[in-house]
Amino acid sequence: MVNLVDNAINFTDEGDVIIQVEIIERNIIFQNQNFPGLLQIQVIDTGIGVSPEDQARLFQPLSKIRQSDRRGLGLGLAVSARLVEAMGGSIHFYSAGEGKGSTVTFTVPLYELPSSA
């Protein structure tokens, strides 16, 4: 999550970075273990956005959409994806296009649901 928030801040010169968290109660099986639900986190920004054509390359290591851009090494999303997948989760990127911000959503299994207060 820190990697994703850092990316959102780096690529948002003005506007907002929003973090949304949701618990999804649903039985999940990962590596022959049952989990009672998922933690879903969305990092939403109003930053530079990414064209639909370029979005497929974002999770490739050392891939940068704008080679002239000095922000980051092009590893952030690739490293984040590997970590999320290793925990049994999934990660997705969406942007309506350049200048229209972006949303990165990832889910990971929860070992137990939070107790109610």
Image (tube, rainbow, N blue to C red):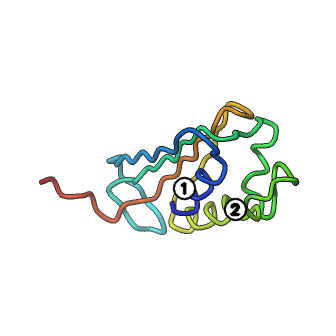
Residue 93 image label? none
| Residue 19 place in picture, x, y as percent | 45, 47
**Which residue is rendered at x = 36% and y = 52% of the image?**
27
**Which residue is rendered at x = 74% and y = 34% of the image?**
98
**Label 1 sits on residue:** 5
Which of the image's four quarters has the C terminus? bottom left
> Which quadrant of the structure image shows residue 80?
bottom right
114 vs 83, left or right, is left
Q: Which one is nearer the viewer's eye here, 115 or 26? A: 115
In the image, residue 19 sits, relative to residue 4, either above or below, namely: above
Could you classify mark 2 by the number of other residues whose Cα lies within 10 Å: few (under 14), some (14-19), or many (20 or more)?
some
The mark nearer the N terminus, 1 or 2, is 1
| Residue 43 place in picture, x, y as percent | 52, 47
Could you classify mark 1 by the number of other residues whose Cα lies within 10 Å: few (under 14), some (14-19), or many (20 or more)?
some
Amino acid type shown at disc 1: Val
Task: Tell me the SS state at disc 1.
Answer: helix
Task: Tell me the SS state at disc 2.
Answer: helix
**Which residue is rendered at x = 80% and y = 42% of the image?**
54
C-alpha span from label 1 to label 2? 14 Å
Amino acid type shown at disc 2: Ala
Label 2 near label 1: C-beta < 8 Å? Answer: no
70 vs 88, left or right, is right
The total of numbered circles placed on residues is: 2
> Which quadrant of the structure image shows residue 103?
top right
| Residue 13 place in picture, x, y as percent | 64, 45
**Label 2 sits on residue:** 78
